[in-house]
Amino acid sequence: MPAKCIMLWIMIQCQRLMIVYIDTHFKKLSQYGRIIKIYQKINTVEIRNFNPNLISERRFIYSKKLVSLMRYRQTGCPMEYYKRIFKRRNIFLGCYESSNNMCITKMTIKYLIALFLFLIHSANSENDNQWVRGAFRINTNMSAGKNSVRDIAEIAREKDIEFLVFTDQFIVLGEYGIPPFRNILKYAKERRSIKTFGIENYLQEIKSTQNQFPDIFLIPGADVAPIYEWTGSLFNPPIVGNRWSQQITVLGSEDAKFYHNLPTIHNNPIGWKFPDSILKWLPFPFIVLSIWIIQKGITKYHDHQGHSYSIYEKPKIALGSIIFLISALYFINNRPFSVTRYSQYKNNKLEPFQNLINYVNSNNALAFWSHPEMEMKGEYGPFLFNKFGKVILHSLPYLDDVESTQGHNGLAGLYGDAITAYLPGKTWDRILRQYCQGTRTVRPVIIGEIDYHMDRPLDLILTVVQVSQKNKREILNALKDGKSYAIMGGITRHLSINEAKILSLNKSANMGETLIADEEEISLSISGEWQTSNAASKMPIGEVFIILNGRMVHQLTMNNSPFSLSQKIKIDPLEKKQYVRFYMKFGGDTLLSNPMFIEKTN
């Protein structure tokens, strides 16, 4: 950033060359001061079509509406109004010149030199990786949250959060039926969700809000519980709904069709599935048979005088009516025109979760296991005029299911409950080892999820990604590749990473990248800072835990900020593909890095 300010200053010193430079990289108020001082040097410039609504307290917002033209107001100038607008990604560079008492050649040389130096710097800076702070797993008032999408975007702007992943609950519907007609004699309870709000309405709400907040990337997604399973019955209480909150967070698609076809319970499409649909239609022949029996039980004749008479054989009519009633009830109960994905009255094992992951992968979207160590238990009821007992909804931790399923993109490592999956040798290391050994095809990434319902600060838990360009696709790719870290902090303090990479000779790799190296030793370099807005707070002693292939190999301490450390690590000579990761604890703050991989050529 100082280099950009110096470049501006050099160009402004050309006296007849006026520059205005607007860039989304100006984030800190201290940097605003430099730019404002530069602007004060241009006392003959008038900025028109200026929209103050596009300026937030902590960021210049890039917009084509921000600067439409600048006018050189010097009178008597042979070139009173001469302009060129250079567009370079998210940079506006407006150049205005006058040749009053100045050699055109000299002016042109100054202009070309300044422009050349500026464009070289701009081209280099465009490839610089930058950290983007985001909040993952946001609930709005369209499901279990209390705030609108716009309200949450406003809060994010105040807290300098640059992307939001909205994952409202997809379906929240519980049905319990009495056999044999469970789909007819049933009690159902449904809460707000994406399905009740409308999938198209949900996506449109996020899209329309995105247009109002061009500086924040709003990414739609959904929290999906593909199955729940009942145990117990009215005659064998208690009735327990198991796996009620065992969820997978899906994101990365803005296509309504993607959500309409999510393979989850109670999201049954209209269609035909062999052989289930054949079984559903089995009662239909009995309906036809019952009608034939009833017709055979009614005999009609006419006498010579033209009168009509009917003779009813009550046994046949009764038999046909019973067959018709039972067959019709079974036919309606079977829902023959829809494809039933799963039944909540049997143990489906891992099939619903694996099918959901496979479906998400086939649509180039992302699937993360959500809060895998959370235990949920709630009691509801009594129901049906207080005649029946309470219903228990229960979810146990499901780290084993995280390990047993393939193809997902990882898991939440930081959230509001007790967490152990990121500790050395635990769940995350085990699936990372599977990935390195080739038995797992998709890289398991760890994220931080806030699970925001307006009950906690939006920036309490963040996922910070490293991108070369700020856009949705780059952010999603960074989440997929693990070019990110998760941070859980406090209201008045903030721990952040400036750089984290492994090095060998003249090669390096950042988080989510692979270092090709045959050396026996590499170096891990980490730099960052711990900040607080509370002047009375003292710098805590920080600890850094370095993990190699699931084993903690180094534990370091720090007591300064900004901090910078470098640690040599001996890699395993027998492993072809390995990884290094670290996690940090600063007081009450926890930071989890995603791994950096090492791959040997021989």
Image (cartoon, rainbow, N blue to C red):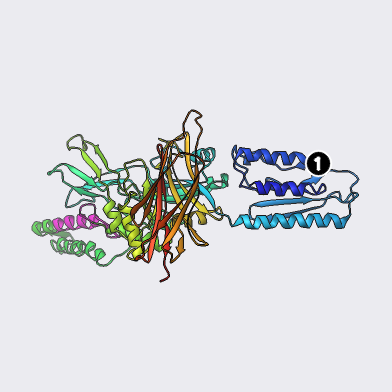
Q: Is residue 543 magenta?
A: no
User: Is residue 180 at all visible to an observer of this figure?
Assistant: yes
Q: What is the magenta range?
A: 320-348
Quadrant of the rendered image containing residue 303: bottom left
In this view, which residue lies farthest toward the bottom? 602
- Comparing 217 with 316, the one in front is 217
- Comparing 351 with 397, the one in front is 397
Q: Quadrant of the C terminus?
A: bottom left
Q: Position of residue 587 (x, y in %)?
A: 41, 37
Q: Is residue 342 magenta?
A: yes
Q: Circle 1 sits in a helix, a strand or a loop, which is it?
A: loop
- Comparing 467 with 337, the one in front is 467
| Residue that carries the numbered disc 1 in the rendered image | 44
Q: Amino acid at mark 1?
A: Thr
Crowd rating for badge 1 (residues with CA inside 10 Å; few <14, some 14–19, many 20+): few
Q: Position of residue 487 (x, y in %)?
A: 43, 44
Residue at the image point whose x is 70% and y is 39% from the top: 36
In this view, which residue lies farthest toward the left? 315
Q: Position of residue 332 (x, y in %)?
A: 24, 55
User: Is residue 266 at all visible to an observer of this figure?
Assistant: no
- Number of marks drawn: 1
Residue 231 drawn above or below residue 340: above
Q: Position of residue 360 (x, y in %)?
A: 39, 59
- Comparing 35 with 233, the one in front is 35
Residue at the image point whose x is 19% and y is 34% from the top: 386
Q: Is residue 233 left or right of residue 441?
A: left
Q: Is residue 276 left or right of residue 364?
A: left
Quadrant of the rendered image containing residue 26: top right
